[in-house]
Image (cartoon, grey):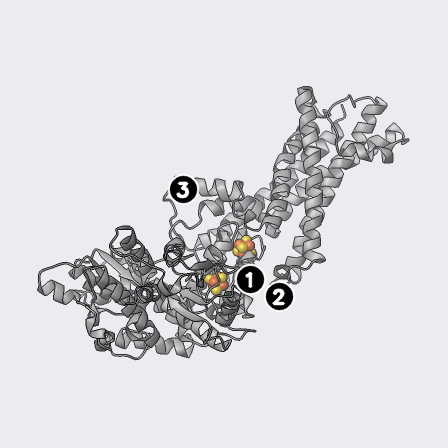
């Protein structure tokens, strides 16, 4: 089935003398992490279905530098940023979509000062715009009536005030959206941000993802929806820790929609 | 007309306000010890934020109980201060209730003051119960032991005493008015202090005058003392909340500051035309910064330091902090309190050494804030969102992480591995950049 995926690169577009409609920034997790790669593919299927002319940078893409910056390594961050900006500016990139809120935040907010000015969208925003332009339709399918709770990624929600796009998409699935006690601007972090993903947590009484998973479980969900590959990992680990992996799925919004469409 | 009380009053006023002015000067000097940053954009948005957040208390009501009680105390204090104006004029001129010529308006004013004073009393008592009997978790953290705990209570006691004195003064005044005592013509309405009349009933006019005068004097001296207490207390927020919300961050919360010093270095490194060994041109400023990131208060920006003085120690930040909620040592409130404490220490050092800071072998990093606290932050911005007066603890944490990494290479080992991977492979994991598109065919 994977042969069906159309994933052209910027270099190919350039060779054909064309510009894609949008650059899909895959991100490190989306490129390398086994779980996140599934999200990447689900999103590509949706892009293909909606006939979006997109391209990826492929091997020319490199880490945005987010984990370096949040670790305090401003040098490494800026080196990464400047390199990526050079590549994207050479391709005259105007519009970017990404399924990673960290890439989204960094490129949208922190690249402009270093010379990279693009219109940047999170994939949930992009999917929503495809929907309102009539290029994509969503049907509930297998998710009709299911209890779904949405975990706000910090770098999408609080960091950039995007709360509604992912929720609108869940509602379109005819699912029952249930909110956790801390949600939207008061959403609790999954524990991965600020480069925590790459290190052991400090000593404490509990891991952050367990706390957040407990909040999610309080809503008695059938599915925990996420919009970030790192949140996805953290929540999946939390669900496993609670031995609920047979009852509750952690799914990216793009996956939900793609599955509902039987893609 | 007696001159002695008027003279004494003027002296008290001059001492009270003079000492306060001295502290304000010190405050400004200390804040200016911070790194210079320019915040002069978007003036209209800034005024709007100040009006909404500081004046309108828009963020306080996110927690309805504390929020509404706080608004009562806040409105009470602001409005009752009109009365202080009258007291000051009376004190200086030797008049009694000089505004009473306003007749009915005066009755309404005094009546309102009394109702508000009563509201303040009730709210303050509930606040005290929350701090001392109900034991809300956010008032029990380790950084709230000792002085911060006393400070919180002292402020409440001050307010109780001031409100009681105000009501006692009015009650005695009313009784004197009813007795037809000389100099106490009928003025004002006393919806609350009228209930005190049974206490005063039967006392001689001279005793009543002593009570009324004593309450009057203690009330105004109390206010002057309170004014001077501010500088040493978290109560400073009643003044600094205004500038602090004005200067608050306007960009998206996820946008962390660009470190300009690093940008310069990176540009030089990336520019093939720059000869790194060339001597700087004559007269050119050698723009190598003393330090990357922050290890002490002088490395932080003045805006960070203003934040520290503004912190009300309410702990809303800490109670929303994922690291703190799960038992880590990090508490964003403590970050702000430590910054202020260290800044005070540096200020005192400067005072003691004739205006020069003498190295005291201490710094914010290590002596106040530990590496463990800094590394526990998930950069989630919950603290920033929660703060009712637009304080940004995360900004300080990030500057200190920059110092740890760029000056001391003191990141946890796993983070160093992650960064080496980014440097070598363009990803935080040890995968080859050339494999980045492999997912397509998997
Ligand atoms: S940004 Fe850091 S300090 Fe602030 S709430 Fe989140 S984890 Fe805590
Ligand atoms: S930083 Fe803000 S939220 Fe935190 S204790 Fe201080 S005033 Fe309260």
Name the mark on residue B142. Answer: 2
Tell me how far mark 2 sits from mark 1, CA to CA: 9 Å
* Nearer to me, B285 or B157: B157
Q: Is mark 1 within 8 Å of ligand 2?
A: no
Q: Assign the N terminus of chain A to one quadrant of the image.
A: bottom left
Q: As displayed, is residue A167 above or below residue B50?
A: below
Residue highlighted by disc 3: B45
The residue labelled by disc 1 is B334
Between the C-alphas of marks 1 and 3, the distance is 30 Å
Along the polypeptide, which appears first: circle 2 or circle 1?
Answer: 2
Q: Position of residue A162 (x, y in %)?
A: 38, 54
The image's mark for residue B289 is none
Rounded to the nearest angstrom, the CA distance separating label 3 from label 2 is 37 Å
> In the image, is residue B417 above or below residue A167?
below
Residue at x-position 51% and y-position 75%: A242
Residue A202 lies, in percent from the top left, at: 50, 74
Circle 3: element type: helix
Depth check, front residue: B333 or B269: B333
Answer yes or no: is residue B365 visible.
Answer: yes
| Left or right for B382, reference B231 | left
Sequence-wise, the earlier of marks 3 and 2 is 3
* x then y, percent, for residue B168: 78, 36
SS category of the residue bearing label 1? helix
Crowding near pointer 3: few (<14 within 10 Å), some, many (20+)? Answer: few
Whether tag 2 and tag 1 are in contact, CB under 8 A, the answer is: yes
Q: Quadrant of residue B204?
A: top right
Determine the residue positioned at 55% across, 44% down.
Answer: B239
Toward the viewer: B179 or B35?
A: B179
Figure quadrant of residue B120: top right
């Amino acid at each position: 089935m994977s042969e069906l995926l159309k994933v052209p690169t910027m270099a190919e577009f350039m060779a054909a003398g064309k510009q894609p409609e949008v650059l899909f920034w895959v991100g490190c997790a989306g490129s390398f992490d086994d779980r996140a790669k599934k999200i990447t593919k689900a999103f590509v299927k949706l892009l293909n279905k909606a006939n979006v002319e997109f391209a990826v940078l492929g091997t020319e893409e490199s880490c945005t530098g987010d984990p370096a910056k949040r670790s305090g390594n401003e040098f490494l961050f800026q080196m990464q940023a400047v390199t990526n900006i050079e590549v994207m500016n050479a391709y005259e990139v105007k519009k970017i979509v990404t399924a990673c809120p960290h890439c989204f935040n960094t490129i949208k907010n922190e690249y402009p000062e270093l010379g990279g000015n693009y219109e940047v969208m999170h994939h949930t925003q992009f999917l929503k715009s495809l929907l309102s332009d009539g290029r994509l339709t969503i049907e509930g399918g297998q998710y009709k009536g299911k209890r779904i709770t949405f975990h706000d990624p910090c770098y999408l929600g609080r960091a950039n005030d995007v709360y509604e796009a992912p929720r609108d998409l869940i509602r379109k699935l005819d699912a029952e959206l249930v909110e956790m006690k801390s949600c939207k601007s008061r959403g609790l972090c999954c524990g991965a941000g600020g480069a925590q993903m790459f290190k052991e947590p400090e000593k404490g009484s509990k891991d952050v993802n367990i706390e957040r998973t407990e909040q999610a479980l309080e809503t008695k969900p059938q599915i925990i929806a996420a919009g970030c590959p790192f949140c996805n990992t953290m929540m999946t680990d939390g669900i496993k820790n609670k031995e609920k992996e047979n009852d509750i799925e952690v799914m990216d919004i793009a996956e939900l929609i793609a599955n509902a469409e039987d893609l | 007309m007696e001159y002695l009380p008027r003279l004494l009053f003027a002296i008290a006023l001059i001492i009270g306000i003079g000492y306060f002015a001295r502290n304000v000067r010190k405050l400004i000097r200390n804040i200016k010890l911070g790194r210079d940053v320019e915040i002069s954009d978007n003036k209209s948005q800034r005024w709007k934020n100040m009006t909404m957040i500081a004046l309108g208390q828009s963020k306080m009501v996110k927690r309805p109980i504390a929020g509404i009680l706080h608004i009562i105390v806040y409105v009470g204090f602001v409005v009752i201060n009109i009365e202080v104006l009258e007291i000051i004029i009376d004190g200086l001129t030797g008049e009694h209730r000089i505004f009473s010529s306003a007749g009915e308006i005066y009755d309404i004013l005094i009546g309102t003051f009394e109702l508000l004073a009563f509201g303040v009393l009730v709210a303050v008592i509930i606040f005290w119960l929350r701090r001392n009997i109900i034991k809300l978790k956010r008032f029990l953290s380790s950084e709230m032991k000792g002085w911060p705990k006393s400070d919180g209570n002292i402020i409440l006691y001050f307010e109780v005493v001031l409100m009681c004195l105000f009501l006692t003064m009015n009650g005695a005044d009313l009784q004197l008015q009813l007795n037809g005592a000389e100099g106490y013509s009928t003025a004002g309405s006393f919806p609350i202090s009228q209930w005190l009349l049974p206490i005063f009933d039967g006392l001689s006019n001279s005793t009543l005058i002593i009570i009324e005068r004593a309450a009057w004097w203690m009330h105004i001296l109390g206010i002057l003392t309170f004014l001077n207490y501010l500088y040493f207390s978290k109560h400073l927020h009643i003044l600094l909340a205004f500038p602090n919300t004005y200067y608050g961050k306007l960009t998206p919360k996820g946008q962390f500051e660009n470190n300009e010093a690093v940008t310069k270095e990176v540009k030089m490194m990336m520019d093939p035309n720059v000869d790194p060994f060339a001597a700087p041109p004559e007269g050119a400023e050698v723009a190598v910064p003393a330090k990357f990131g922050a290890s002490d208060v002088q490395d932080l920006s003045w805006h960070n330091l203003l934040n520290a003085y503004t912190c009300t120690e309410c702990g809303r930040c800490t109670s929303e902090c994922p690291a703190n909620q799960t038992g880590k040592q990090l508490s964003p409130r403590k970050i702000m309190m430590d910054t202020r404490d260290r800044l005070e220490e540096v200020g005192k050092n400067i005072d003691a050494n004739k205006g020069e800071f003498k190295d005291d072998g201490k710094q914010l990093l290590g002596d106040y804030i530990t590496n463990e606290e800094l590394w526990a932050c998930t950069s989630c911005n919950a603290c920033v969102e929660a703060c009712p007066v637009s304080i940004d603890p995360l900004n300080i944490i990030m500057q200190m992480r920059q110092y740890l990494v760029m000056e001391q290479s003191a990141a946890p080992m796993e983070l160093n591995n992650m960064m080496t991977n980014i440097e070598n492979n363009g990803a935080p994991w040890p995968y080859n950049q050339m494999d980045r598109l492999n997912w397509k065919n998997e």
